[in-house]
Amino acid sequence: QVQLVESGGGLVQAGGSLSLSCTASVDLDAYTMGWFRQGPGKEREFVNAIRWNGGQPYYAESVKDRFTISRDNAKNTVYLQMNSLKPEDTAVYYCAATDRQATRFVGEYDYWGQGTQVTVSS
């Protein structure tokens, strides 16, 4: 079983930054990794994703100039660097994994972390 654990969430003022980490229980060198988020009363939505070789990251338009996804397969970890945070970024952030070359769709991912809360105040 693949287990994912997110960390790094918290409360930050608008314009600030946070860095999230997701550590897996297995080697990730064959997995596409993605970040999703779910705000209050909203559906889970795609944030960004990076394939197993790290060569083709994908971003939602709302975050492409502010968020960066990266991975360190040797540490079984994927990161989400969030800059210039806005109140609308407030959500529970989830990391997800799949052994397919997935991109933006929830249904493409097989394994999910428990989520970490990010709250951005105005």
Image (spheres, rainbow, N blue to C red):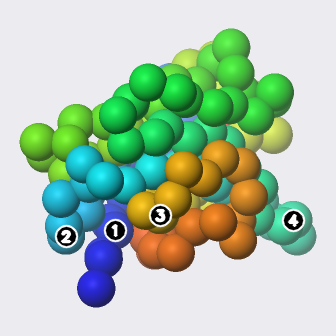
Is the residue under label 2 in contact with that under label 4 (CB below 8 Å)?
no
Contact flag, marks 1 and 2 (Cβ < 8 Å): yes
Q: CA distance from mark 4 to mark 2?
A: 29 Å
- What residue lies at 18% left-to-right and 59% top-to-bottom? 27
Dot 3: element: strand
Give the SS element for disc 1: strand
Q: Looking at the figure, which quarter contains the N terminus?
A: bottom left
Name the mark nearer the viewer: 3 or 1.
3
Name the spot of residue 19 as percent of width and height, x first. 40, 34
Find disc 2 in the rendering and name its residue: 25
Helix, strand or loop for disc 2: loop
Q: Return the residue found at the far bottom.
A: 1
Q: Is residue 58 above or below residue 37?
A: above
Separation of marks 1 and 4 at Cα, in angstroms: 23 Å
Q: Earlier in the sequence, mark 1 or mark 4?
A: 1
| Mark earlier in primary sequence (3, 1) | 1
Q: Which residue is mark 3?
A: 98
Quick one: which residue is furthest to the right in this view? 41
- Looking at the picture, which amino acid does disc 4 mark? Lys
